[in-house]
Image (tube, grey):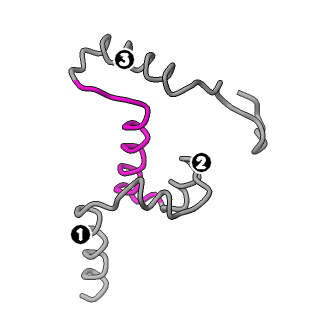
C-alpha cells in the first residue's frame, strides 16, 4: 500500500458484486461455513457490528461510501442491544 492515499486513489481493486460473491462462496466453502453470505450481507454486518461497538454512524457511513447519513440509518438499523447500552450510559451518569 502506498504511504499516503488521497481520496481519489483506490486501495483495493474494485470488483463487481457478482465476482465478489463468487470469491466469497469459495472462501466460505474452504472455511466449512454452512451459511449463505453475500457481499451485501457482509456490508450489513460490518455496519451493524460497527455501530454496536460504538463506531459513530458518521464513520460507518463513510466506510460504506454513503453520501448521506439517511442511507446508513436505513441500511444499518440500530438494534435493541445498542439502544440498551446507550440508555445504560445515561443511567450511570445519573447515579
**Which residue in the structure is indicated by mark 3?**
25
| 88 or 70, nearer to the observer | 70
Residue drawn at x 36%, y 17% as measured from the top left: 25
Location of residue 24 in the rendering, given as x and y in whole percent from the top left corner: 41, 20
- For the N terminus, the quadrant is top right
Location of residue 66 in the rendering, given as x and y in whole percent from the top left corner: 58, 53
**Which residue in the structure is indicated by mark 1?**
84
| Dominant secondary structure of the residues highlighted in magenta in the image | helix
> Callout 1: 10 Å neighbours few (<14), some, many (20+)?
few
Asked which secondary structure carries label 1, the reply is helix
**Which residue in the structure is indicated by mark 2?**
65
- For the C terminus, the quadrant is bottom left
Span colored in magenta? 35-55
Q: Nearer the viewer, mark 1 or mark 2?
A: 2
The quadrant where residue 37 appears: top left
Q: Name which of mark 3 and mark 1 comes first in the sequence.
A: 3
Residue drawn at x 31%, y 84% as measured from the top left: 93
Amino acid at each position: 500500500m502506498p504511504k499516503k492515499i488521497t481520496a481519489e486513489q483506490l486501495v483495493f481493486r474494485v470488483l463487481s458484486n457478482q465476482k465478489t460473491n463468487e470469491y466469497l462462496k469459495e472462501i466460505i466453502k474452504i472455511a466449512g461455513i454452512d451459511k449463505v453470505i453475500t457481499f451485501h450481507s457482509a456490508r450489513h454486518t460490518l455496519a451493524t457490528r460497527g455501530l454496536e461497538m460504538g463506531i459513530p454512524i458518521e464513520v460507518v457511513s463513510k466506510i460504506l461510501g454513503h453520501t448521506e447519513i439517511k442511507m446508513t440509518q436505513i441500511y444499518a438499523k440500530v438494534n435493541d442491544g445498542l439502544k440498551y447500552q446507550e440508555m445504560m450510559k445515561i443511567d450511570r451518569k445519573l447515579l
